[in-house]
Amino acid sequence: MPGIKFTGPKLSQSINEKTWGAIMVSQGIADMCFGSCQIIDETTGEDYIFREGEPYDPIDLPYGHEVGASFLCDNCGEVALKVFVYIELIDPDGVARASAWNPRGSIPASINPGVGYYSENIGPVTLDKTGLWLVYGRLEYDIA
Amino acid sequence: MIVKEFVFGILGGRITQDLANTREKTWDAITVSQPVNVGGIKGHVYHKETKEPIEGVVVSFQLYSDQTDPEGYYEITEIPVGTHTFTFTKGGYYIAERDATIYKDEWTTLDVELTPGEGPEPSGFPWLWVGLGTAAAVGIVIAKKRLSD
C-alpha cells in the first residue's frame, strides 16, 4: 500500500508580509526654564526685573535698605511636570539670609507646558553688608 | 556660579523628595557700596517737663544708631545725605520720630524732648487734646448762654 504523501504548496511562495512604521509614542521633552528674577527694594517700593536672555547689571542699592526677592520659572517642555522651586538670598559673605521652598510640604506643584510659576517672595532682608548679594534659584522637576 | 550641596530632610519647611531633574541659576543681584556722600547728626534729648537730660535713649535711622550719654548727648556719623526720619526710643517715654536733613561732611543738630508715656507718640500730641478741650469749653459756654437767653 502506497503511503500518503503530502505535497502542499511551498509557504514561502504563498504568504506575503509587510510592516508599516505607523505610530511613535514618546513622553515628550520635560524641561523647566528660568524666566526672570525680581528684586524688590522694600524701603523705596521700587522693583527690578532681570529677564532671562537679556543682559543685566546688578542693581546698586544703598546700605541699610530692605529687600525681597523672587523668581519666575516656566514649563518650557512638552509635558506636565511636578515641580519644587527653591530660592535663597545670599549676602557677600556667602551666608543665606533668606530662603524658601515652594510649595511648602511634600507635594510638588503640577505645572502644564507653557505655564509660569513663581518662587516665594523671600525677605525683607536688610542690606547690612557692602559687596555683591546673590539670588540663588533651584528647580526640581519630573514628569507628572 | 555657586556650587552648593543640599542637605535633604526638612529644609525651609519642606520635606524634600529629590525629583529626577534639577536646574540651578545664580543671579548677581545687588551691589551695596559704602555711601560716599555722608554727614552726621548730633544733639541732646531732654525730658519734656523737667528739661532734664535723658540717658539711654536709643536714636536710630535704619542700621545707624547711638544711645544718649548721661548728658543726653548722642551723635551718629556716616549717614547718607538726604532727609531721614530718626526715631528716639526709651522705655517710659512716647516714641518720638523726627525728620532731619543730612548734608555732606557737615553736622546736623537735632535736639528732642520726650514726653512720659508708652508706645508711639499720639498723633498731633499735645495740640490735638488742647484743641479738643478748647472746643468743648466753647461749646459749653455757648450752650449756657442759649439756655440763659
Image (spheres, rainbow, N blue to C red):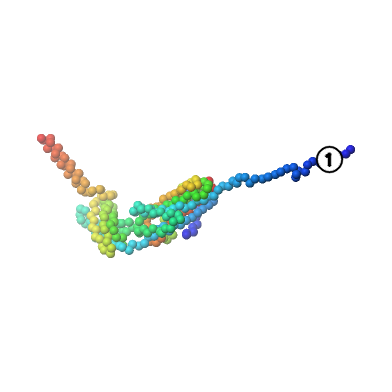
Query: What residue is rendered at 25% in x and 61% in y?
Result: B108
- Which quadrant of the structure image shows residue B31? bottom left
Q: How crowded is mark 1: few (under 14 residues within 10 Å), some or many (20 or more)?
A: few
- Total of numbered circles in the picture? 1
Residue at the limit of the structure toward the left, as seen here: B149
Q: In the rendered view, does A58 fall on the left or right side of B76?
A: right
Residue B126 picture location, percent across and down: 21, 49
> Which residue appears at 52% of the width and 48% of the height?
A78
Instruction: State the quadrant of the C terminus of chain B.
Output: top left
**Of the residues shown, which amino acid type is indicated by label 1?**
Lys
Q: Which of B8 and A114 is in front in this view?
A: A114
Q: Residue at the location (20% across, 44% down)?
A: B132
Tell me the chain of label 1: A
Measured from the top left, where is residue B36 in percent x and y? 32, 63
Residue drawn at point x = 43 percent, y = 50 percent:
A120
Instruction: Indicate the position of residue A37 as horizontal and vertical percent values.
Output: 43, 53
Q: Name the residue under label 1.
A: A5
Q: What element carries label 1?
A: loop
Image location of residue B146, percent across then percent down: 12, 36
Q: Nearer the viewer, residue A35 or A13?
A: A13
- Horizontal side of residue B32 vs A11, given as left or right: left
